[in-house]
């Protein structure tokens, strides 16, 4: 069954071989949660905070991370060669002396992460923006990294 | 906090909804902090990517429900290179044990964090009871 569904859609599988696995894993997790009520700890992706989504179009790479409650000045973004480093500290201010907590699920702390970009980028024109708790870093590709349209004669 | 800890990556908790959604899409459970003082209950929820106009908060029969929609932020012509998290709605529900003064509820959404202030109704506030010597 699985093998068939993979080979029936060769494009989908080869373009993103882990996508299929991820989806199966998520479905398994949901099933496990439904039966046992608790999910086991399993690091996602690189297992380093924050989780980053890297996408590309013809001109740019885009790195995005969810960093709710973080201000731009608490973040440090650096590019060295092809390595994009994101570090910072998430602070959660204390809420006064006389508060009694019911739940405390939000976490504070330091983090540091490096992502290797698949191509060269123009280091002088990188833009980073925080909006509604989502960090978006736009990295323009250099001419060499951009796809070249080839005319078929 | 004297020493800050290293933040660990935490997978977004996908919700197993009792009610099936009519529109397809993922639903996540936001991380929350809830604390109370004598006068109010405050709820903080991490909902990155939610804009104030996409936030719905409802208090009905002592059940607080809040939902935040996230508009996918990727351009249609972007291709995935590395995906470590997924985008979806946020939804959570709490049963409140105390009476809330509905008119004075305040909600603020800043940098992807919802701050909901629920003032306790007059009768739910603690009263000091003086014991008189008989």
Image (spheres, coloured by chain):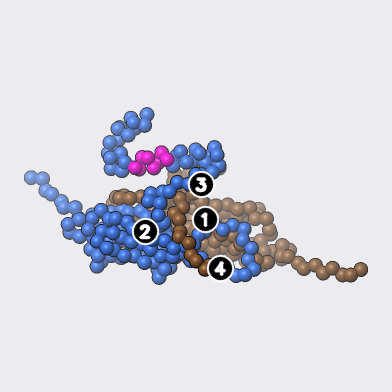
Chain colours: A blue, B brown
Residue B15 bears which disc, if any? 3
Q: Earlier in the sequence, mark 4 or mark 2?
A: 4
Residue B4 visible in the displayed image: yes
Which image quadrant for residue A11? top left
* Disc 2: host chain: A
Determine the residue positioned at 64% across, 63% down.
A100
Q: SS at mark 4? A: loop
Instruction: Single out the residue that lies furthest toward the front.
Output: B3
Side (left or right) of B56 relative to A6: right
Q: Which residue is mark 2?
A: A113
Q: Nearer the viewer, mark 2 or mark 3?
A: 2
Q: Which residue is mark 1?
A: B31
- Picture layout, residue A101 above or below residue B28: below
**What whole-number distance in Å separates the C-alpha atoms at marks 1 and 3?**
12 Å
Q: Main secondary structure of the magenta part?
A: helix
Q: Nearer the viewer, mark 4 or mark 3?
A: 4
Q: Nearer the viewer, mark 1 or mark 3?
A: 1
- Picture layout, residue A4 above or below residue A128: above
**What whole-number distance in Å separates the C-alpha atoms at marks 4 and 2?**
26 Å
* Disc 3: host chain: B
The answer to whether the residue labelled 4 contacts the one labelled 1, judged by CB atoms less than 8 Å apart, is no
Q: Residues within 10 Å of mark 2 (few under 14, many from 20)?
A: some
Q: Which residue is mark 4?
A: A94
Determine the residue positioned at 34% across, 31% down.
A3
Nearer the observer, B104 or A59: A59
């Amino acid at each position: 069954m699985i093998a068939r569904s993979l080979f029936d859609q060769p494009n989908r599988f080869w373009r993103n071989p882990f996508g299929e696995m991820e989806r199966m894993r998520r479905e398994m997790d949901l099933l496990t949660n439904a039966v046992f009520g608790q999910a086991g700890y399993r690091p996602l992706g690189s297992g380093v905070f924050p989780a980053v989504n890297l996408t590309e179009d013809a001109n740019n790479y885009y790195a995005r991370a969810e960093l709710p409650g973080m201000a731009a000045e608490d973040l440090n973004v650096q590019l060295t060669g092809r390595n994009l480093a994101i570090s910072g500290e998430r602070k959660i201010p204390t809420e006064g002396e006389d508060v009694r907590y019911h739940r405390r699920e939000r976490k504070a702390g330091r983090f540091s992460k490096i992502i290797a970009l698949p191509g060269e980028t123009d280091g002088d024109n990188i833009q980073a923006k925080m909006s509604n708790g989502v960090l978006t870093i736009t990295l323009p590709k250099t001419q060499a990294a951009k796809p070249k349209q080839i005319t078929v004669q | 906090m004297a020493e800050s800890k290293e933040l660990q990556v935490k997978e977004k908790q996908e919700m197993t909804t009792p009610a099936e959604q009519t529109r397809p899409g993922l639903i996540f459970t936001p991380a929350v902090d809830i604390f109370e003082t004598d006068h109010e209950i405050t709820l903080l929820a991490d909902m990155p990517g939610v804009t104030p106009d996409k936030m719905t908060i409802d208090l009905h029969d002592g059940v607080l429900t809040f939902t935040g929609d996230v508009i996918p932020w990727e351009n249609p012509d972007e291709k995935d290179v590395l995906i470590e998290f997924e985008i979806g709605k946020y939804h959570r529900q709490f049963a409140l044990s105390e009476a809330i003064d509905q008119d004075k509820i305040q909600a603020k959404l800043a940098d992807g964090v919802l701050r909901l202030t629920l003032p306790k109704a007059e009768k739910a506030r603690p009263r000091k009871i003086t014991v008189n010597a008989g």
